[in-house]
Image (cartoon, rainbow, N blue to C red):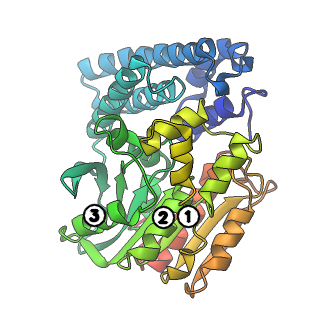
Amino acid sequence: MYQYFPQNYTWSLAVMSALNRGGQIAEIDEACRGLQEAATKKALGGDPVAQNAWFESWCRMAERVQRLAEADEAAGHPLSAGRKYLRVGLYFQLAERMPSHKDPRRLVAYKKGIAAYEKGLKLRKEPIEYVAVPYGDTTLPAIFMKAPGDGPTPCMVHFNGLDLTKEIVYSAIADEFRRRGVSLLIVDHPGVGAALRLQGLASGPDTEKPAGACVDYLETRGEIDPKRIGIIALSLGGYYAPRAAAFEKRFACCVAWGAIFDYGEAVQSRMDGNGEPSVPGYGEHLNWVFGKDTFGETLEVVKQMSLEHVAARITCPLLVVHGENDRQIPLWHAEKTIEAAVNSTDRELKVFSLFDGGAEHCGADNSTMVVDYMTDWVAERLGAAVRGV
């Protein structure tokens, strides 16, 4: 993986996220050029000086690009403005990922980011709808994208991981599903995105509940074939998606974009200093995601998040993709997930190598390798018509 910050995996991972999701390299370099010293200040442990430096630098870049977008919009160039607004949304969300969630500036940056991203999608006339999926006595914010063509299409429900958002997922994968004739419902489920930040919905082990609500919603849409709905999720979603497919039998296929066989073990291993954290202030971030006051309470929740006695319930086709150089989650998580899914007669483990690319966590070093493989696999399993548009 290209490590812009050689001594800071998490910041380098964020740079790769920007590069893989539409950021411009000159703007990324400008935002990061003055951060090399801050990157060595143990920002992962919650160093406020380092986190503040990152936050302010990326916000400045987002604000600069926003001024350019507004100028394009005022001049009557919506497509040019829209492309810039998408980068504004990305940069604000990259800014807000580093400070503590208790920092009030973080929520301000998040709101600016999702507003800019929504504006960019609309100005670019992307084929999307912002929808609210009914979930108990509340709703889950989501982006729905219909594949082109007439008649009911297959559709994937896309969940996130520990710290991503529906907007960041959209920029990574949505167009490739659309080109393969697969519609997409990208959901901020409990524990991520707007569901966590704006609605206070915490995550938990039973992901079949929000996933089932998404299937319920898609079954009300006539343009979706209810027999061809699958689920995909990345990073911590390597637990979320297989767990959902195990208990929600309406899913026709499942993709784990990076495996998590035993999340309790993974969390404990990272806290013991083995493996790279994905976010600064890892323990505090987990408390926020799972809605607990202490790490001890959080640990009790994540210890329940294992596929050991769950994977055998998966009966639909299952794809697990993993990088051989994943520094966050060892490859054995992927191997055990496939081994345990004994009742999925169409199960596959795809390991991406350092030689070919896509070998880091969720393909962070080259996401196109992983995205191409997953979207082709889904299109084949769901019988999608490859549109090529």
**Callout 2 crowding tier (Cα within 10 Å): few <14, some 14–19, many ≥20:** many
Q: Mark 2 and mark 1 in contact (Cβ < 8 Å)?
A: yes
Residue 349: x %, y % from top left: 67, 72
The residue located at (58%, 72%) in the rendering is 319
**Callout 3 crowding tier (Cα within 10 Å): few <14, some 14–19, many ≥20:** some
Residue position for label 1: 256
Q: Amino acid at mark 3?
A: Ala
Whole-angstrom CA distance, mark 2 to mark 3, is 14 Å
**Callout 1 crowding tier (Cα within 10 Å): few <14, some 14–19, many ≥20:** many
Residue 362: x %, y % from top left: 62, 52
Q: Splitting the image into 4 quarters, where does residue 353 fall? A: bottom right
Visible residue check, residue 258: no
Q: Nearer the viewer, residue 207 or 74?
A: 207
Q: Amino acid at mark 1?
A: Ala
Q: Amino acid at mark 2?
A: Ala
Residue position for label 3: 213
Q: Nearer the viewer, mark 3 or mark 1?
A: 3
Disc ID at residue 241: 2
Q: Nearer the viewer, residue 180 or 340?
A: 340
Quarter in which the N terminus is drawn: top right
Q: Mark 1 and mark 3 in contact (Cβ < 8 Å)?
A: no
